[in-house]
Amino acid sequence: MSRGNWATGDDRKLIRFAMKVPMLDRDEEGELALSWQQERDEHALKKLTEAHLRLAIAAASKYRHYGLPVADLIQEGTVGLMEAAYRFEPERDVRFSTYASWWVRAAVQDYVLRNWSIVRTGTTSAHKALFFNLKRLKARMGVDPDRPLSMGSRNQIADEMGVRLKDVEAMEGRLSGVDRSLNAPVADESAQEWQDLLVSESPRPDQEYMENVDGAKKAALIERAMGSLTERESFIIRERQLREEGVTLAVLGNQLGISKERVRQLEAQALGKLKQALISEVGDPRMAGLASG
């Protein structure tokens, strides 16, 4: 592997160390894996992982173009290497390097996805595959990386990757954009910032206050109207209408010792009483509408 100029001084020290660690043959690798698996031999684990640090460094080199510190990429690759050591089953007769390569690559890719942008990028397996392959596919198709794909090219990529067209379109837009600070001015010499243009979905303070006041008034009004009901009618209304999940007619019938049809009749009767009690206190809204007309 060519070291090039992508590594810092500390990174190069680690690379030199990794290159000096001798490779393990199949028998040595199996013995170390068994010692760790059966006896939790820390020395065996250390020797096994150090002999495969090249995998973490190779992955860091491959994904260095995403603008993240190489040291962090190597560290994440090492985490994947340790995870592979914990899960490796030597009795399956698979070389550790083959098994660990997948874990190392997955750990580095997950780190890139989490840190490439302040906006979460890869939320599905399709997005993840597109994130790491879209530029390569565009280059292979001879498309200028700075130009948008044609609809035909998008369909071709969707078919080749086995993903939805809208996933291709979403990832293309995400990769062509850049993060922008919400505190940045909208224009040069402007006092307005981008965050000033965000619309809050929460109610305004005055709306929230009015809703709370109105809610309290409505609750008090209903409570007074409930005084017009008998004890059994009040119980039915509270259980059927004022609970978050209303009780069924059958359940109430069993509790009151009556049929569910009788419960339905009592509920309709109680609702009629409530309506009349509310109209007598606040007036009939239908009459108010006619008066205003």
Image (tube, grey):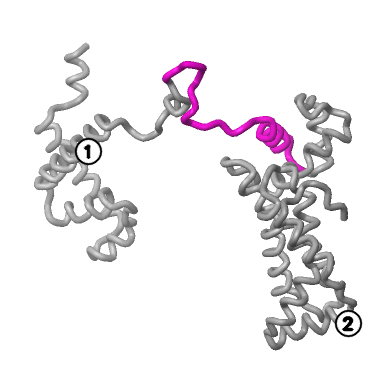
Q: Would you place residue 175 above or below residue 34 in this image?
A: above
Q: Nearer the viewer, residue 56 or 209?
A: 56
**Badge 1 amino acid:** Asn
Residue bearing mark 2 = 27
How many tags in the picture?
2
Q: Residue furthest bottom?
A: 39
Residue 28 in view: yes
Q: Would you place residue 117 above or below residue 57 in this image?
A: above
Residue neighbourhood size for the residue with mark 2, other residues' Cα within 10 Å, grouped as few (<14), some (14–19), many (≥20): few
Q: x%, y% of residue 161?
A: 80, 43
**Badge 2 amino acid:** Asp
Residue 166 in view: no
Is residue 201 on the magenta stretch?
no
Q: Residue at x 12, y 38 (%)?
A: 277
Magenta stretch in the rendered image: 163-191
Q: CA distance from mark 2 to mark 1?
A: 73 Å
Q: Quadrant of the C terminus?
A: top left
Image-quadrant location for residue 263? bottom left
Q: x%, y% of residue 206?
A: 24, 30
Is residue 190 on the magenta stretch?
yes
Q: Would you place residue 49 above or below residue 149 in this image?
A: below
Disc number placed over residue 212 in the picture, else none: 1
Q: Earlier in the sequence, mark 2 or mark 1?
A: 2
Image-quadrant location for residue 273? top left
Q: x%, y% of residue 222?
A: 16, 42
Q: Residue at x 65, y 46 (%)?
A: 122
Q: Residue furthest front?
A: 9
Q: Would you place residue 122 above or below residue 75 in this image?
A: above
Q: Nearer the viewer, residue 60 or 26?
A: 60
